[in-house]
Image (spheres, rainbow, N blue to C red):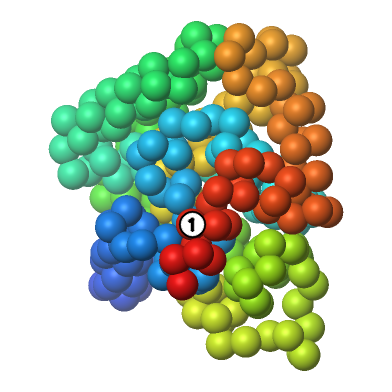
Amino acid sequence: MSLINRLFDFEAVINQIWLITLIGMAVLYILCNILPDRIVGVFLPLHNVFKPQTNVDLDYQSIGYALLHTTWVTRITHSTVIIDAVLWFVIFESWHWSVSLMVLLIMLVQSVFIGDKKFGLFFILMGIATYISALYVIQFLGLPSAVLLSKVVLMLGGLMRMLSHSAELIPPLLLNNSDQFQKLSAKNINWKIPLSSVIGYVGEFGSGLPNRILPVQVNYLYQNVFGIKPETTLAWKEVEVSAQKVLTGGYSQLNSLKNYFNSVVKGQ
C-alpha cells in the first residue's frame, strides 16, 4: 500500500500522461480505420489488426502475433496482456458499470464472428474471469487506488511491450518497400523508426484491451494448455508454420499478408 500512497503524490502527472495516451489510442484506432493503408501502413506494421473486420479474423491475428513476437523478450512482455485486461475492466468500472457490460458484449459478438464455438466459449469465460478479477481488485484496494495503479501498470505495460520489439527483426515497409523482415543497423535506420516507436507505444497500450491481443492468447492457451483442437480456425502449429514462412520469405508467402502489403505499396 505504501507504493500506492507514493503514486498518489504524482497523481496529477499520472492522470495527464494517461489522458494523452488514452486520446492517442483513440486517435490511432480512428486513423487506422479511415486513412488509406498507404499512409498508416508505412509507420505501423500490420495496422489493419485495428480494423473490426480483421479483428475477427483469428487466423490472421494469430499469425501476425506469432510473426512479430519471436524472441523470449517479446513473449514475456506480451504475456501480461491478461493482466492488462483485468486492469482495463477496473478502468471501465470507474467510468460506469455499463461500459464493462458493453465490452463483454463486444467480446461475445467478436467470438460469434470468429465462428469457432470452442474458442468462443473459452474467450467468453476468460472475459468473465478478467471482469470478476477486476471487481476483486477494486474491492481489495478501493476504487481510487485500483484505478491509479491500473493506469500506471497499463502505461508501463505498453511501454515495456514497445521497447521489447527492439529485439525483433524490423517488419516490412518500415525501412523500405520490400516485403522482407530485416535487421536494423546504422546503415539502414531512417526517420520512420523513431516515429513508429512512438506510435508503437500507443498501439501496444491499446493491445491490452480485452478485445485486442487477448483473443490470440486465449487461442494459444486453449489449444496448447488444454489440448483442445479448434473446429474452424487454424491449429497453433499451423499458425507457427505460416509465421515462419513469412518471417523467412516475406509477406508474399501468405495471401492475406501479400494482399496487405499490396494495399500499402500500390497505394503510394
Q: Nearer the viewer, residue 251 or 23?
A: 251
In this picture, residue 25 sits left or right of residue 213: left
Q: Nearer the viewer, residue 128 or 267?
A: 267
Seen from this angle, which residue lies furthest bottom? 187
Q: Position of residue 185 (x, y in %)?
A: 78, 83
**Can residue 218 be seen in this snapshot?**
yes
Residue corresponding to mark 1: 263
In this picture, residue 56 sits left or right of residue 244: left
**Quadrant hosting residue 238:** top right
Q: How crowded is mark 1: few (under 14 residues within 10 Å), some or many (20 or more)?
A: some
Q: Does 109 sit above or below residue 213?
A: above
**Quadrant hosting residue 20:** bottom left
Q: Which residue type carries mark 1?
A: Ser
Q: Does 191 sit above or below residue 37?
A: below
In this picture, residue 36 sits left or right of residue 23: right
Q: Does 212 sit above or below residue 46?
A: above
Q: Number of labelled discs?
A: 1
Seen from this angle, which residue lies furthest front? 266
At x 44%, y 38%, the residue is: 55
**Can residue 141 be seen in this snapshot?**
no
Q: Nearer the viewer, residue 103 or 40?
A: 40
At x 39%, y 17%, the residue is: 112
Name the element at disc 1.
helix
Q: Which of 23 and 76 is in front in this view?
A: 23
In this picture, residue 211 sits left or right of residue 161: left
At x 28%, y 57%, the residue is: 34
Q: Position of residue 101 (x, y in %)?
A: 24, 26
At x 47%, y 47%, the residue is: 49
